[in-house]
Image: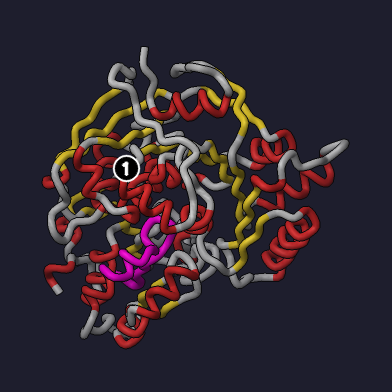
Amino acid sequence: MGMTMAEKIIARAAGVECTKAGDIETVTLDKLMSNDGTTHLTIDMYNNKLKNPKIADVSKLVWIVDHNIPADSPKTAASQKKMRDFAKEHGITFYEGEGVCHQIMMENHVCPGELIFGADSHTCAYGALGAFGTGVGCTDYLYAMVTGTSWLLVPETIRFNLTGKLPEGVYARDLILTIIGKISANGANYKAMEFAGEGLHTLSMADRISVCNLCVEAGAKTALMEVDDIALDYLKEHGREPKACFKSDDDAVFSEVIDIDLSTIQPIVAKPHFVDNVVPASECYGVHIDEAFLGSCNNGRIEDLRAGAAVIKGKKVAPKVRFLVVPASRAVYKQAMQEGLLDIFMEAGAIVMNPNCSVCWGACQGVIGEGETLISTGTRNFKGRAGHKDSFVYLASAATVTASAIAGEITTADRV
């Protein structure tokens, strides 16, 4: 019997010839990522709970300060100092002020065929490069950090066969929100979401990261995409070689196969307070907004900034609307400067921020107040995600968010 991509990657990491959904395997991790959201807790456990603490392989660790940067309080500053000092003491690869953790990992570290634990739920983004990325809590992260290993229940796989091409003015963000709406927020619980088919080859790397990144919002354990020339070119541009390029066997067993015609996708909005509460963007026309956010690990790449800048060039942000533009990394920020995109946003009245999680994290920059409404390219829209518990968050593509910032109400790019 053949194996899925997820099964093959786990088998490689476990050092076995084959495995199947439902098996439990002991695996060796290729990389371990953690950010300032929880790393201070891991450090406390390492220092105070272990009898003989020792890092198994420090070369596999990547720590990134991205959630609250610059620090927003003395408490945050203390936790980041703890992280900074520990990383320096132990020689851990460390980034601060460089951008959002998943963007940094994709730019500098992820390779096809790897098994990666990240202390952040959106680690499934790494599937865009054919890597099995999955989010873990502090305890699992600590165990992997000190042993180099962990265990995994091999997940079942839902296969998404993509055909056709996204229409003009429709984006990968619309695609993944459509899929989440179709299968629900629990539709892929502890499953791998695998994407393949001729339609996959029409998606850029930015598109692929956007799709894989949000799969956790359907409950997925991981997301995976077949590695093709587009992925290999991206890897080469960033100076890396694949560990292994896997694809599912023809006789692999899937829990479900879903066909998606990309040409049928339309602009989508996820309404409060659930990511699977999706509707055509047209059903939200006229909803007043107080703030718009273009950024995050889902939509802060150069392609997203280009899409937003194309919409807002020569126009102005609506009065009394705050429009936050936050590049996902320093590299994206610099490229956006070179292309004149940041000038376009600032001339329109947008607020351009340093690379970080910003209002997607909801604990620092740009939080919204009671009764306020945000339209966002962030990852989640549950109650209180972006500020006050009695605020409202709508999710949409970079183009729809930018158009809404101009109009002062939810709309799409073709209407401004």
Position of the N terminus, as image quadrant, is top left
Residue at screen point 45% across, 60% down: 360
Residue at screen point 35% across, 71% down: 291
Question: From the viewer's perspective, is 296 left or right of 16?
Answer: left
* Residue 298 located within the stretch drawn in magenta: yes
> On screen, 273 above or below 133?
below
- Provide residue 401's location: percent of width, then percent of height: 28, 66
Q: Can residue 271 be seen in this view?
A: no
Position of the C terminus, as image quadrant, is bottom left
Q: What stretch is highlighted in magenta?
A: 289-307
Residue at screen point 24% across, 52% down: 174
The residue carrying mark 1 is 228
Residue type pointed to by label 1: Asp
Q: Nearer the viewer, residue 199 or 212?
A: 199
Q: Nearer the viewer, residue 365 or 26?
A: 26
Q: Nearer the viewer, residue 67 or 202?
A: 202
> On screen, 18 above or below 245?
above
- Provide residue 21's location: percent of width, then percent of height: 44, 18
Q: What element carries label 1?
A: loop
Q: Which of 59 and 24 is in front in this view?
A: 59
In the rendered image, the residue lying farthest to the bottom is 347
Question: From the viewer's perspective, is 163 left or right of 160?
Answer: left
Residue at screen point 17% across, 68% down: 413
- Provide residue 411's location: percent of width, then percent of height: 19, 66
